[in-house]
């Protein structure tokens, strides 16, 4: 049992917010984002579930002084933070909802403590962002990632303003791309640069088959970050998983197409065993 002081430190470090009652639903945001990105989704579930929100260290309103480059040199550092939150709040039977890189972070957390988790919902997941032909298409060549990281080093603000609209891919809703760019720019550039490197160079393909918890994979129909082949690959590798190809485009359907995202999540939760 964690002492109250330790619990408080964890909750402050990751700016944890809890409200509602019932089965826990833990939301984990993607790279360069924060818990506010879930605001369109939460109202549909807060009457039935205990909602748990947080910010990764270096994002949102987390305690940036808690950042440790060695700890966060791979995705396990972030997975351990999720488990710290789960332990501090004594959560069980969790519905985990992850976006982008958080899908694999959540997967790693569930492999460490599978008894804590009940269902996994992955929005725009990728097990590896770099192509490994001919067996795997991740969407990027290694040189693409190298150039992306070099651009972050040279002109982080310019990188954010250029890439955010392409990631959002909803030109009819420019305010969403602007919000994502602002979120990128509000993140400490040094921390963001390391998180980006850890994210885009990660390879969790061998972890997929270890997941024994039911999983819903939500794959957008046109996504710069996670192409269709990635969703199909995850469905093939994760036993008992369910893949849904969304009408939504871009990498952030919980923001650009919340109604479709809510419908697919709700249908899955109502029917999954």
Image (cartoon, rainbow, N blue to C red):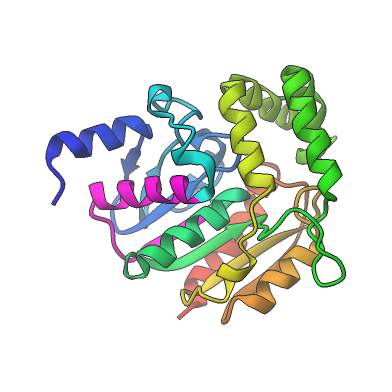
Which quadrant does the C terminus fall into?
Answer: bottom left
Q: Position of residue 55 (x, y in %)?
A: 45, 35
- Judge whether 189 appears above or below 252 on screen: above
Q: Is residue 119 left or right of residue 136?
A: left
Q: Is residue 93 located in the magenta-colored stretch of the structure?
A: yes
Q: Is residue 17 located in the magenta-colored stretch of the structure?
A: no
The front one of 64 and 49 is 64
Q: Position of residue 264 (x, y in %)?
A: 61, 64
Q: Quadrant of residue 61?
A: top left
Residue at x 15% of width, y 34% of height: 5
Residue at x 38% of width, y 66% of height: 117
Q: Position of residue 69 (x, y in %)?
A: 49, 33
| Residue numbers of the magenta segment | 76-97
Q: Is residue 129 left or right of residue 144?
A: left
Q: Is residue 216 left or right of residue 62?
A: right
Residue at x 35% of width, y 37% of height: 16
Q: Position of residue 87 (x, y in %)?
A: 26, 52
Q: Quadrant of residue 30?
A: top right
The front one of 188 and 133 is 133
> Can residue 164 be seen at all in this image of the molecule?
no
């Amino acid at each position: 049992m964690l002492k109250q002081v330790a619990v408080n430190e964890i909750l402050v470090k990751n700016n944890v917010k809890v409200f509602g009652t019932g089965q826990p639903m833990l939301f984990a945001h993607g790279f360069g984002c924060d818990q506010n990105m879930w605001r369109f989704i939460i109202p549909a579930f807060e009457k039935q579930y205990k909602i748990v929100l947080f910010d990764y260290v270096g994002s949102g309103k987390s305690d940036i002084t808690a950042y440790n480059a060695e700890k966060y040199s791979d995705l396990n550092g972030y997975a351990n933070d999720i488990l710290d939150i789960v332990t501090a709040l004594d959560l069980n039977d969790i519905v985990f909802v992850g976006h982008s890189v958080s899908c694999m972070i959540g997967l790693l957390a569930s492999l460490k403590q599978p008894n804590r988790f009940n269902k996994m919902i992955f929005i725009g997941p990728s097990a590896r962002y770099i192509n490994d032909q001919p067996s795997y298409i991740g969407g990027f060549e290694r040189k693409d990632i190298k150039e992306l990281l070099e651009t972050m080093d040279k002109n982080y603000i310019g990188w954010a303003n250029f890439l955010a609209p392409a990631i959002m891919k909803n030109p009819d809703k420019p305010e969403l791309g602007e919000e994502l760019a602002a979120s990128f720019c509000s993140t400490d550039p040094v921390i963001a640069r390391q998180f980006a490197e850890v994210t885009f160079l990660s390879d969790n393909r061998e972890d997929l088959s270890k997941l024994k918890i039911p999983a819903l994979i939500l794959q957008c129909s046109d996504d710069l970050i996670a192409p269709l082949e990635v969703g199909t690959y995850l469905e093939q590798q994760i036993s008992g998983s369910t893949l849904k190809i969304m009408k939504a485009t871009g990498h952030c359907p919980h923001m650009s197409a919340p109604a479709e995202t809510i419908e697919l999540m709700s249908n899955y939760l109502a029917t999954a065993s």
